[in-house]
Image: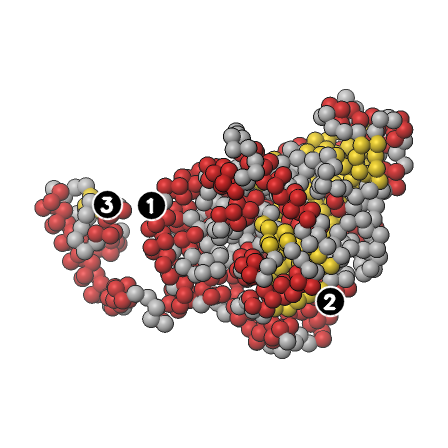
């Protein structure tokens, strides 16, 4: 069998047989404790500056961010954004309790449809699990209430993210996922799909020049919910 | 893929005469380099991260059997299947069998170098299944029926005019007089074209930048989003990955990701970094119903325990070729197989045999830039030197080169004779210089060294004798 052939060849190269039980236990211990390595200093900041770094990095990667004070302000912010971009008011939305609980009837023209995205959708609204200030990255783990297609198929991807969910480094976002997510099948922390998204889709395949608007969304707009008093910018 | 590596010299000569290629190489020159330099300058910890990256990969390779077994067990726990394949034949058949069982007619593909290595497309086509490349660069190469010339920018050798001409030639249902005013118009046409293919495909095939033992995940890193559409929309997702892609944990992978995009395109992070783990879960509204990992050896396990083991640390960022003066002069196709540039010059002989690729390790000036930018510190020039030694030992080196090396070695082992000979040569050159150039300037051509002086001039020796003679004189004066 190829499995045995491959493992045998590796062991021959390493000049040993299968690892003895104590060494296997040591490696399994490393897997269980999953030690962190060096984390760059750039994201070790006080909360307001960490959030500011997140915003700065999203914008550097051609995404846009709008801060909203509370969930009740989301429909107006989204309706104005869609109108300004000349985009339709009907769109698929992640069937996440937090999004379902938004008072959408404050803007009756908006028609959010809790479902996955289709190939013809122009706008989608996703629920953000976490943000990573280090590079302005969104962490979007899949779940029944957070379909992956909402990250990919629409021309304009809108994501609602709580400021309290912004971390400095990727490792902290992994820790949040490890702590909060239980997979229905494995009992572990990994859902079927975890996407890290940094800005809208692009390609450098034509003459090594980055151009926006490849196969994924052409625009990425983040509605940042200021739910974290410690993360607000200092009052002017 | 047909190997033309033995004809490297002819390939290179043709590449130097190819005006279109030279234009493309000129346009590309520096784009990735400058962006990488800026990204690295922006992360003061970069050098320490390179050490960490090297150590993670070394630890993994030293325990590769254990981490592969753990990875496979975790894939199965998440509802996926692992297909262990020793050879390219086995891997091709495994992919075909999955596609056939699904009754697949079209298969979308994300960019994957292992797929190029295995020749997946030809194999599927031969059996009546249509593969559709969806990475922009791979898409145009499929239209042109060409292999990639770069491992992260497959169409590195093409100019914008080539894109426009090929799109007009192949997309004949669109208006002939349409205008491509900007590069993004080309991008938009490909996007529209491929959208329907994404939605219609029965199977999606991607590569994998990493596999994670802890979780049984395959990881892809892209900018376009094509890889994600490929692995999300069809009913079946196949991830093709070679055995050295595995790393232990999410944290290990995360540290390597900090190196990858910066070393590759000079971005801090690529747009999409995606971890796939098993098949669709109960209640999920999307995602594939089947998840397969085709785990390929194809010669890699033989590198373990040899002087080429460290090559298995490679994370395929392409920094080595982006910084290579030889690659920059002749492009990727001259190397004659799937992997070009310095990493290819080391890897290709390991995978297909030095007798078929003998010239590749010689396609280097040993300037050392590749090693100095490698995010996992692979000693590429040292390994090319190992290949040169093997080539020499096995009498694969051409006669004239062997004779020249033998002659040089004879003198090099006899320092007295060596000094005598260099003194005589310097003296003769000095006399020749005095007679023909008045003792100043440089020779534009020299007998017996015509090929050498074709590309550069040799200065007339200055009075004072050889370096050793002048060094000895200096020592005496002190």
Mark identifier at residue B29 = none
| Residue at image point 76% right, 54% down | A192
Chain holding disc 1: B
Gap in angstroms between the C-alphas marked 3 and 1:
22 Å
User: Callout 2: few (<14), some (14-19), or many (20+) C-alpha neighbours within 10 Å?
Assistant: some
Can you give x and y, in whole percent of width and height, for residue B23 in the image? Answer: 40, 39
What residue is shown with label 3?
Answer: B457
Chain holding disc 3: B
SS assignment at label 1: helix
Please give left or right for residue B362 compared with residue B104 in the image.
left
Gap in angstroms between the C-alphas marked 3 and 2:
63 Å
What residue is shown with label 1?
Answer: B17
| Residue at image point 73% right, 31% down | A65
Labels 3, 2: one chain: yes
SS assignment at label 3: loop
Can you give x and y, in whole percent of width and height, for residue B379 in the image? Answer: 48, 58
User: Callout 3: few (<14), some (14-19), or many (20+) C-alpha neighbours within 10 Å?
Assistant: some
Labels 2, 1: one chain: yes
What residue is shown with label 2?
Answer: B73
Q: Please report contact status of discs 3 and 1: CB closer than 8 Å, yes or no.
A: no
Labels 3, 1: one chain: yes
Q: Please report contact status of discs 2 and 1: CB closer than 8 Å, yes or no.
A: no
- In the rendered image, the residue lying farthest to the front is B173
Can you give x and y, in whole percent of width and height, for residue B415 in the image? Answer: 24, 65
Query: Quadrant of the rendered structure where residue B54 is?
Result: bottom right
Can you give x and y, in whole percent of width and height, for residue B436 in the image? Answer: 11, 45
Gap in angstroms between the C-alphas marked 2 and 1:
53 Å
- Up the image or down, B444 lies above or below A54; here it is below
Q: Do we see residue A50 in this rendering?
A: no
């Amino acid at each position: 069998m190829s499995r045995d052939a491959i493992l045998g060849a590796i062991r021959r190269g390493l000049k040993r047989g299968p690892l003895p039980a104590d060494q296997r236990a040591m490696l399994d211990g490393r897997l269980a404790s999953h030690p962190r390595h060096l984390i760059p200093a750039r994201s070790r900041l006080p909360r307001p500056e960490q959030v500011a770094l997140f915003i700065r990095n999203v914008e550097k990667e051609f995404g846009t961010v709008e801060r909203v004070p509370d969930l009740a302000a989301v429909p107006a912010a989204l309706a104005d954004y869609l109108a300004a971009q000349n985009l339709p008011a009907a769109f698929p939305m992640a069937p996440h309790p937090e999004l379902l609980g938004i008072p959408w009837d404050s803007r009756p023209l908006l028609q959010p449809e809790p479902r996955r995205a289709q190939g013809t959708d122009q706008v989608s609204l996703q629920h953000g699990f976490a943000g990573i200030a280090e590079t302005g990255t969104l962490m979007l783990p899949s779940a029944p209430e957070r379909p992956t297609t909402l990250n990919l198929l629409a021309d304009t991807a809108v994501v609602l993210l709580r400021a309290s969910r912004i971390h400095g480094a990727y490792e902290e976002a992994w820790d949040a996922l490890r702590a909060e997510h239980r997979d229905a099948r494995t009992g572990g922390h990994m859902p079927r799909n975890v996407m890290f998204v940094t800005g809208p889709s692009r390609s450098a395949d034509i003459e090594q020049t980055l151009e926006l608007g490849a196969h994924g969304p052409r625009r990425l707009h983040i509605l940042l919910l200021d739910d974290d008093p410690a993360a607000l910018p200092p009052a002017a | 893929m047909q190997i033309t590596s033995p004809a490297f010299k002819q390939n290179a000569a043709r590449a130097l005469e190819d005006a279109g290629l030279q234009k493309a190489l000129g346009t590309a020159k520096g784009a990735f380099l400058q962006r990488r330099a800026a990204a690295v300058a922006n992360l003061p910890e970069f050098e320490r991260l390179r050490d960490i990256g090297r150590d993670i990969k070394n630890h993994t390779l030293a325990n590769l059997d254990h981490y592969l077994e753990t990875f496979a067990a975790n894939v199965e726990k998440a509802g996926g299947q692992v297909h262990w394949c020793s050879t390219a034949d086995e891997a091709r058949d495994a992919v075909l069998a999955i596609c056939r069982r699904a009754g697949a007619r079209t298969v979308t593909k994300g960019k994957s170098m292992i797929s190029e290595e295995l020749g997946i497309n030809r194999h599927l086509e031969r059996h009546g299944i249509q593969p559709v490349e969806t990475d922009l660069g791979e898409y145009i190469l499929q239209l042109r029926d060409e292999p990639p010339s770069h491992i992260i920018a497959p169409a590195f050798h093409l100019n914008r005019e080539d894109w426009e001409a090929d799109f007009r030639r192949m997309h004949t249902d669109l208006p002939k007089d349409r205008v491509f005013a900007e590069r993004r118009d080309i991008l938009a046409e490909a996007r529209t074209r491929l959208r329907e293919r994404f939605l219609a495909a029965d199977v999606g095939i991607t590569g994998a930048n990493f596999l994670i033992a802890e979780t049984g995940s395959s990881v892809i890193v892209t900018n376009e989003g094509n890889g994600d559409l490929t692995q999300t929309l069809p009913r079946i997702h196949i991830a093709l990955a070679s055995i050295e892609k595995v790393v232990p944990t999410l944290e290990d992978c995360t540290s390597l990701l900090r190196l990858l995009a910066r070393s590759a395109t000079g971005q801090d992070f690529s747009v999409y970094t995606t971890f796939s783990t098993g098949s669709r879960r109960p209640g999920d509204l999307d995602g594939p119903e089947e998840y397969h990992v085709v785990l390929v050896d194809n010669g890699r396990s033989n590198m373990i325990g040899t002087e080429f083991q460290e090559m298995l640390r490679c994370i395929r960022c392409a920094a080595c070729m982006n910084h290579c003066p030889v690659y920059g002069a002749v492009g990727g196709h001259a190397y004659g197989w799937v992997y070009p540039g310095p990493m290819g010059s080391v890897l290709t002989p390991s995978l297909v045999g030095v007798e078929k690729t003998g010239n590749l390790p010689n396609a280097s000036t040993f300037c050392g830039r590749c090693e100095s930018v490698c995010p996992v510190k692979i000693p590429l020039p040292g390994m090319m030197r190992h290949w040169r030694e093997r080539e020499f030992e096995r009498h694969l080196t051409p006669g004239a080169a062997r004779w020249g090396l033998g002659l040089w070695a004879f003198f090099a082992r006899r320092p007295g004779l060596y000094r005598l000979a260099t003194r005589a040569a310097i003296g003769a050159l000095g006399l020749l210089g005095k007679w023909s150039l008045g003792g100043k300037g440089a020779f534009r051509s020299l007998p017996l060294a015509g090929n050498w002086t074709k590309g550069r001039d040799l200065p007339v020796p200055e009075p004072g004798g050889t370096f050793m003679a002048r060094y000895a004189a200096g020592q005496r004066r002190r």
